[in-house]
Amino acid sequence: MQRKFKRKRTNINQFRYKKGVTPYNKGKIFQKVENKQYVRIDSSAHNTNEQLNTLINQQDVHGNSIDVPYQLLREKPNSDLVHNVMETECERPNMDNYKLFHAKKVEDLFDYASKEHFKLKCDGKLLFDENREKQWGVVWQEGMYCNKCNYKSKMFKLYEEVESQELKKGRKAAKPNVGLILGLMTTSIAYRPICDIFASMNISPPDLTSMNHLANKISDKIVQLNTDDMSKIRKKIRLKKEAIGEKDPSCIRAEGDGRFNNRFGDTPFQPASQAVYTMLENETASKKVIAISTVNKLCKRGQIARLKDKNAVCPNHPGKCTATLPEDGIIGNEERLAADCASQVNEDRLSIRYFTADGDSKSFNGIQRTQKGTVEYLRDTRHMANSLKRAIVNKPFSANLFSNCSRSQQQAFKRRFASDVRARCVSELNSALKHHNGNIHKVKLAMPNVCEAIILCYKGYCGDSCQKYSFTCKGLTNDRWLRNYMPRNCVIRMNAKDESLLVECLHIFLSPQAVQKMRFLTNTQATEAFNRRLNRVNPKDVTLSRNYLGRVHTAALMKNHGFSGSTVLRCKKLGATLSAGSRVIKYLGMRQKKDSYDKARQISQKFKKRRSELKFRKYRLHENKNFSAHYSKDLADKNETDHNYAKNN
């Protein structure tokens, strides 16, 4: 007791007046206000703290003081909207909302209670016993009582429990609770927002702590499930290659790319808190995920530990640490992440022979270091085409390259010209490979003549050269390259220097060296699409440090098996099996058919043609508008230079 009082006195001494401090009112004379009237504002007079402070300070809209004969007081506490409905005269308010029950379990409860109550020959009404009910996540344990006699039934669990050994620690989990966590892992929302949704539906929200504990268990099981599933996929690829009689069934083609939750760079603050590197196979049309490597710097327990002990370092501090990399670690090292993915591939007797990636990382070095044989680095066709476009935009072409073009429109016309040349080169390469049945030697021999035909075609001499050398433009009136990206009535006037610059740009995509590196027409678009899928389960503005891995591997299961298949697989793994033949299974079947239909429709020629027509229509609309700068630097603040607005070209 004496020690406690001593500690309290020490805390008081920290905030008491020190010797030598002059009071703020020493020597000041205050005039006494006679007949001062105090008025308390009604809560309906203001809604925000900003309005409240303005009224209390007694200032007008211009910030000038107002001399009023009364003093305004703040409103009474606890007069908000929630407090007004906190009390009710209803005897059973909890019976006026909605609950989640299992249909058969409710039937069993009513059957048991009605038979037991019938023996007492009482005409009372059986009601749910609000005083004995227990909530377990989103489900309930209920009993019944009679409003006349003293009858009370035994308690019934109106839900099914998980019998799987995957979640054997602690109290048995309810199937709806497990299903709720599995469903949330396929969305961008966390656990507090789902409680808010439940409250809006007049449903009692589950306890956040119990949901987090259950989600932690489920997340670890999902990681193990997807790891085993990716291993099965890799084994199936090898068995399929052995079945068709390949000489070396262990060699595969793959692609990979990384995804970071935020930007990283030279900054003393937290750079790129989480990262995922994904590797997909290029052996099948589905391009399934075969390896995942993740890095995480977030650890809430580590942050708390550092407040008490400055020497606590992640990931080596006591207790559960969710971080896998120190705070000062380089999270943008894709070479290390790619090497980890390649090591996973090697575990199932597979080796990467061809690897496709973009050119802005060292991931290929990590792949090469972990493979026994030689790995060939293939170029992404989409990134190579974009490099061609950027080169054309940055080249110093002559000022009179385009006719009917003002000086302010030169850059816009150049960008559209670059887009059109890019589309032409991609079409030429695809058509050439198709024409020569993939014979890369013949394609490389034809590309110099193709480049010459492209230049003559844009100069207006589309005829014999296109008919003889081009694989896309036939040089005919009804069969020629339409230049849909270019404005109407725009004539391209190239001099010798412009032709030389354009040839340099064309060689970026159509040179023999570039064609050799793009001979399989592989790209990382499937990986980019998976990265967008990650934005659904793990958005960049929501940091889930503990369940981060579970959501990433959930996205991989959805990519490999679809939403419906992955849902059945995950529920079965965790013992929360779905009812066969129910409306739930019928919905998943309908969802699977709809997803397959949408996927087939989006890769059809009709859909691609329609999408191109809509894109070119927007270009035509853009020609008729004179867009001026509405959002750029120095529009309002002429002398300010510290803004980081993007330039409007």
Image (cartoon, rainbow, N blue to C red):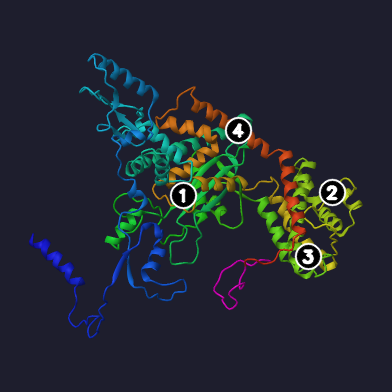
Looking at the rendered structure, the secondary structure element under dot 1 is: strand
Give, as a three-letter code, the residue at label 3. Leu
In the picture, measured across the screen, residue 574 lies left or right of residue 172, that is: right
Q: Earlier in the sequence, mark 3 or mark 2?
A: 2
> Marks 3 and 1: CB-CB under 8 Å?
no
Label 1 – label 2 distance at C-alpha: 46 Å
Q: Earlier in the sequence, mark 4 or mark 1?
A: 1
Q: Earlier in the sequence, mark 4 or mark 2?
A: 2
> Marks 4 and 1: CB-CB under 8 Å?
no
Q: Residues within 10 Å of mark 4 (few under 14, many from 20)?
A: few
Q: Nearer the viewer, residue 136 or 250?
A: 136
Q: Which residues are magenta?
A: 632-649
Q: Residues within 10 Å of mark 3 (few under 14, many from 20)?
A: some
**Badge 1 is on which residue?**
294
Residue drawn at (50%, 34%), measured in percent from left and top? 566
Q: Nearer the viewer, residue 445 or 271?
A: 271
**Badge 3 is on which residue?**
501
Specify whether residue 82 is in view: yes
Marks 3 and 4: which is nearer the front?
4
**Badge 2 is on which residue?**
473
Residue 546: % across, % down:
38, 48
**Badge 4 is on which residue?**
594
* Quarter of the picture holding the C terminus: bottom right
Label 3 – label 4 distance at C-alpha: 49 Å
Label 4 – label 2 distance at C-alpha: 37 Å
Q: Looking at the picture, does residue 213 appear above or below residue 23?
A: above
